């Protein structure tokens, strides 16, 4: 079972290989590590999650439900502060989550909060327009973490919502 620690080891590999010039060689495809993992304390971030990555846009971030330290492995919650639906359970495990984005990245996942059918269609096919840097990072995810593609399906998201969304604890807005 993959853990946050394994995900951070991938970032260590990137930094050891390219150092401060890493962004000339890899694009994190909407999965920029948050180190150390912490609760990202947006108004809508569940207090019982530990945030481990962000997309780099509009405060969107990913957290592990009831995560404790670097051994946390799932379920994965996406928090989208700008949307009317702020939290979406996207995967039961970190491995499933990484598999969802290992072909096209994770940035477009935020569209689940705005136009789910468009996001599902995007993840159902291979994005042929990815940059060399994006392809480099996705290749590292697949090879170093031995992740295989996992389809993003509406039925699976409905199951995850039913199973885990009631467990989220969000502070009331004052």
Image: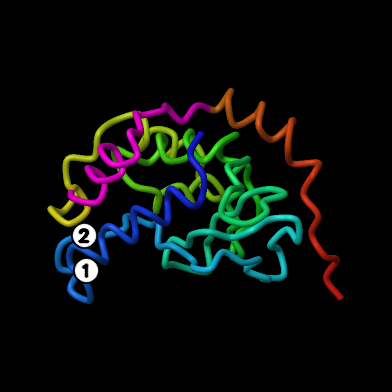
Q: Is residue 101 magenta?
A: no
Which structural element holds mark 1? helix
Residue located 15% across and 68% down the image:
24
17 to the left or right of 57: left
The image's colouring method is rainbow
Residue 48 x/y as whole percent: 75, 56
Residue 122 located left or right of residue 65: left
From the image, tell me which residue sits under label 2: 26
Identify the mark at residue 23; answer none if there is no mark.
1
Q: Please give the name of the residue rendered at 21% of the width and 59% of the height, measured from the top-left corner.
A: 26
**Are the residues tagged 1 and 2 within 8 Å (C-beta)?**
yes
Question: 141 or 109: nearer the eye?
Answer: 141
Residue 88's mark?
A: none
Give the percent coordinates (x, y) of residue 88: 62, 46
Answer above or below: position of 7 versus 60. above
Q: Is residue 83 above or below residue 23?
A: above
Question: Would residue 84 be seen by someone viewing this image from the given angle?
Answer: no
Towards the viewer: 147 or 106: 147
* Residue depicted at 25% across the width and 46% down the height: 140
Image height check: is 62 above or below 101? below
Q: Residue 152: within the magenta?
A: yes
Going by the image, does 109 lie left or right of 88? left
Magenta span covers which residues? 136-153
| Residue 119 percent across, percent down from the top left | 43, 40
Residue 24 visible to the viewer? yes
Side of 159 where 8 appears, left or right: left
Q: Secondary structure at mark 2?
A: loop
């Amino acid at each position: 079972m993959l853990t946050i620690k394994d995900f951070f080891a991938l970032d260590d590999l990137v930094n050891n290989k390219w150092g401060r010039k890493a962004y000339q060689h890899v694009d994190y495809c909407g999965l920029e590590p948050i180190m150390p993992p912490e609760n990202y304390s947006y108004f809508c971030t569940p207090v019982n999650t530990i945030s481990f990555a962000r997309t780099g846009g509009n405060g969107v971030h990913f957290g592990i439900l009831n995560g404790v330290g670097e051994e946390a492995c799932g379920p994965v919650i996406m928090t989208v502060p700008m949307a009317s639906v702020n939290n979406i359970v996207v995967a039961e495990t970190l491995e499933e989550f990484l598999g969802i984005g290992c072909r096209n990245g994770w940035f477009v996942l935020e569209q689940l909060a705005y136009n789910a059918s468009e996001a599902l269609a995007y993840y159902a096919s291979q994005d042929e327009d990815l940059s060399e840097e994006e392809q480099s990072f996705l290749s590292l995810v697949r090879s170093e973490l031995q992740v295989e593609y996992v389809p993003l399906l509406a039925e699976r998201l409905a199951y995850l919502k039913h199973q885990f969304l009631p467990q989220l604890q969000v502070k009331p807005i004052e």
